[in-house]
Image (spheres, helix red, strand yellow):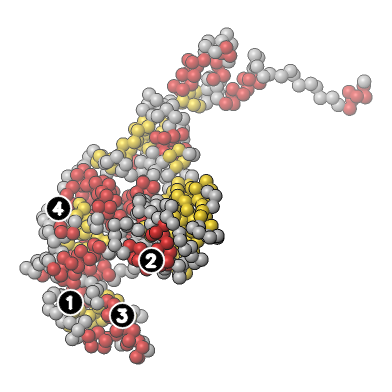
Amino acid sequence: MTAPKTLLLCTCDKTQSFSPEALQTAAAAEQVIVVDQLCGTDMKTAVEHMGGSGELLVACGQQAALFERLKEDVHTEIQHSAELNTIDIRDRAGWSASSAKPRRIHAKQAALMAAAQLPASMAPAKTIQSSGVCCIVGPTEQAVRMAELVQDDLGVTCIVNDAGPIQLPSANYDMARGRLTGARGALGNFELEFAQLQTLNPAGRGAPGYGEAKATARSECDVFIDLRGGAPAFPSYQKRNGYFWADPARAGELERIALTARERVGEFEKTVYFNLETSLCAHSRANQPGCTRCLDVCPTEAIFSFGEHVQIDSDICAGCGSCAAVCPTSAVTMNETPFEALTQAMAVMARVYREHTDEAPRLVFHTLGAGADNIAFLARYYDGLADDLIPLGLEHVDRVGHAEIMAAFGAGYAEVLVLADNEIDRRAVTAEVELAQAMLKGTQNSPGRVRVIAAEELGAAGDNAGRVSDPVLLVGGRRDITRVTVGAMADKVEAPIPLPKGAPYGAIEINSDKCTLCLACVSLCPTGALGDHPDRPEVQFTENACVQCGVCESTCPETAITLIPQLDLSKDALSARALHGEEPFECIKCGTPFGVASTINRIVEKLENLHWMYTNSDNVQLIKMCDDCRVKAQFHGDNASMAASGRPRVRTSDDYLDS
């Protein structure tokens, strides 16, 4: 039996309004209570309901920490407490300058409340061990200073890259001199490479000296502090756990790093953000290169080639989701906020909003960090979000691909916006946004319905009139939902929609003058888009299955294949069609079809009377025979080149007795 749920609403000192009935329905709550200052004069109401046995949902995100402390106090006092959950509907919907249309505001609040009731996806975690072995690389003065700051908690080795003096070598950490040439790994398993490494010899009187230089050396550590002042050792270094890069222009940088680095000792849980199904990966086949989309977009270089598929280092992966956003076969999916969970949340919010307003909302993807902070700042000090703009928070907006965007349109949103925290985020989503815009343009919709925005554009109103198709059922994978949505938005689009280069949808074109029908492309196609005919030499193609990985193009020995990025919405794209085929050659002995007629004729033309084996002989006829007849002709014909003498008569006992 489900525990009764109580919904606590706060007008935040009478600065926002509600529709308690709508929110009660959206939250599936047994009762709803409205107060004016839940974190102040009405706090006793919160405490009273925290002592219950059911579920308590507090519609205040700002004071979530306060309510958690109150719950702990109540539990300590009476040995039990209600299950507590909080949700922010004030910053995202309650505070808006569009007070002339409270219906929209209340509808958005109900939409956010309904989405919050969906089950949260759980991502698995792995354990990382760090013994606190720390390597500090940089100039002598800064490296020694950092070593002094962290030596009490970490086992330190300093690798200096200059000739700075060491007057009083410390026994609490080791010193060496060398040049960093390579680095890989993450917290607990860094591997560093150095050139011209010299260890410090602290013995003797006077200034200590360094020993003999080693041309190359390797070292392992758990924590890596980089004080060199140049480019970081890793791309997107902020996402590399256990790596600390010092900005030389920032005051107090060493102290800031030391404060955090000292805590990197012990056992840590690392979320495994992704799931990789290698059998679906179209990266390579038979050493022929194919899809590299995830390798191209991964900001942390956590993805690497591993034969016919890719592999992902879960220690390095920061969970941005850019790989899942561009993977054409769904070989990479996210454990955290999977595609199915996103589409479900988008559909629920759009449906609830439309039920209350009979209008189409707009959607904005934002990060749960800076993006959420910008929304809260805009709400408190400016006009807040537009009353028809529903926010959907993600850990990283890199997670947003064309499929998520098109799913939002399929759910019934009028516009889809992506709030970029910085230029890096903007670049990360640009290609996928452009792909979605090409699909919109191909369906005679305005490409401006999807765009990347800055924080100052959040309050702008939208024009929803006459731009939204009826919602579609968001069932299936990324490609299925994309195709269904684009088809629903199209108005009798007969020709395929052209897409940008690199799009994961399209056709292939075969140059019939070059193609020899060797079928190498068919045998290596990773998605089964290419097939052959069971009875004749022919290449067949199912466009809906093609992900434009390029394996066929790189495999073709005649360079006869060209990729054509496009989206064909017709039913023809769902079934196999012939791309190129020829009549088979019939064996001159038994009439069995074999090979390709043009190929056999071309071989005969090149060899007959032009090669010594096929001059003034019947050998050229062997080329025109099937395998069985060719063997028979070579061994049993009158002029067979491999014919043997007749088999001797079998001798019996009588033969031996008569002799």
Q: Mark 2 against mark 1, which lies toward the viewer? A: 2
Residue marked by disc 2? 258
Q: Which mark is residue 146?
A: none
Tell me where residue 546 sits by quadrant: top left
Label whose residue precedes the other's in the sequence (2 or 1): 1
**Residue at 21% over, 82% down:** 39
SS of the residue at dot 4?
loop
SS of the residue at dot 2?
helix
Is residue 202 depicted above or below 195 in this figure?
below
In the foreground, 637 or 549: 549
Label whose residue precedes the other's in the sequence (1 or 3): 1
In the foreground, 536 or 501: 501
Is residue 91 depicted above or below 57 in this figure?
above
SS of the residue at dot 3?
helix
Residue marked by disc 4? 467
Task: Mark 1: give few (<14), some (14-19) or many (20+) Cα within 10 Å.
Answer: few
Q: Name the residue furthest front.
A: 206
Task: Mark 2: give few (<14), some (14-19) or many (20+) Cα within 10 Å.
Answer: some
**Residue at 22% over, 57% down:** 419
Q: Mark 3 against mark 2, which lies toward the viewer? A: 2
Cα gap from disc 3 to disc 2, whole angstroms: 31 Å
Residue marked by disc 3? 68
**Residue at 35% over, 58% down:** 246
State if disc 4 and disc 3 touch (CB < 8 Å): no
State if disc 1 and disc 2 touch (CB < 8 Å): no
In the foreground, 520 or 93: 93
- Percent x, y for residue 601? 47, 18
Q: Name the residue furthest left.
A: 100
Label whose residue precedes the other's in the sequence (4 or 1): 1
